[in-house]
Amino acid sequence: MVNIADRYGDVQEYYFSQKLQEAAKLNATGKSIINLGIGSPDMAPPRQAVEALCTAAQHASAHGYQSYKGTPALRQAFSDWYAAYYAVSLDPETEVLPLMGSKEGITYISNAYLNAGDEVLVPNPGYPAYAAATKVAGGVVRHYDLREETGWLPDLEDLQQQDLSKVKLMWVNYPHMPTGAKATKTALALLVDFAERHDILLCHDNPYSFILNDKPESILSVKGVSAHVLELNSLSKSHNMAGWRVGVLFGHPQHISNVLVAKSNVDSGMFLGIQQAAIEALRQPQDWFDELNARYAERRELVWQLMDMLGCRYSTAQAGLFVWGRAPEGVEVGQLVDQLLYEAGIFITPGFIFGSNGQRYIRVSLCANTTQLQTALERIKAFKNTKIKTT
Ligand SMILES: Cc1ncc(COP(=O)(O)O)c(C=O)c1O
């Protein structure tokens, strides 16, 4: 057997890739698993986006390879979106790079900047792709702690005491996944200042700012694009387009060119119909977000009930597509998650997959409709009466 390359030796198969296979096996035996694990929006994208895709697909000229950096019209639409919703001004020609999802951006940024042994500050808990991309690119992951007591914000005082001389990149993500914590503009400004003082490239991953969040913030509103800041964004959550794979990177023209070197050697541009659909999505007025959030708010009420039933403690001020709750003392989270899957037919995510600081927590997705959530509540009621084991 030919072995997998060493660079993947320390990188596990993505948790959901494994767990969804288990759920699929259970479904094949007749169980109907309610998936509250994953943040894949279940509602439709804007109608105009779907129409633009269909229209484009009918033209023979739409099917060829596309520019590596997207059409000028798409870059302009991203720039207009940032001006309208984040009050950030960006040059569509040089400061905007459309991506096929922000996840690929995490990989391209890592590949573009990391030499063997370069260190990367990665949040614990945080999105697992930051650590995976770092390792695959040959970098060294240095987790930094996020804790409930400090609002899940980095302790910059503590970091400053450490030797940061080998740190090249730092990942931050607010509203934060999985905790739903928000960062004020002041907190974002402190991060930019920290990055400048330590000559670190600060990468802000910002896909959740429109979900259950009154005031979307961009880290680029602190000082605009600069040598020390990049921002990723995405239409996956804000426009229900996760499967379409539309993301974007914003930054200084030199950084955009550097990341383009990594990207253009892997993919060959985004299908024109998807780009035209993305333009329509980006033109949606505030009503789009208001309606989306009304639905999520309704669901969140039910997820709060679910958390209450399980005895979990949670903040009602969280933003984003999930509710993050602390399991009751004595309940072993891995066991609870497996019991819910195998005995109650509900898939939720254990907090430990996001890092050791998540190990007492669970994460429940809002990407299920109210009927499914009501069923989940009934199943949990039945399950809870008999099953929750404590250590
Ligand atoms: C924090 C965070 N960043 C990035 C992504 C990837 O989003 P995209 O669909 O744009 O690749 C996710 C997806 O769940 C996420 O939670």
Image (spheres, grey):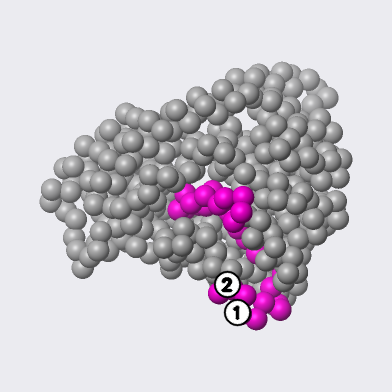
Q: Which residue type does callout 2 highlight?
A: Glu
Q: Residue at x 74, y 22 (%)?
A: 56
Q: Tell whether 382 sits left or right of 91.
A: left
Q: Which mark is residue 141?
A: none
The residue that disc 1 covers is: 161
| Cα–Cα span, label 1 and label 2 | 7 Å
Question: Which residues fall within the magenta stretch?
Answer: 158-187
Q: Which residue type does callout 1 highlight?
A: Gln
Q: Is residue 355 above or below residue 182?
A: below
Magenta stretch: includes residue 186: yes
Q: Which mark is residue 157?
A: 2
Magenta stretch: includes residue 227: no
Farthest left residue?
Answer: 386
Q: x%, y% of residue 82? A: 71, 37
Q: Is residue 52 above or below residue 155?
A: above
Q: Considering depth in this image, is 361 or 149 the residue closer to the camera?
A: 149
- Quadrant housing residue 190: bottom right
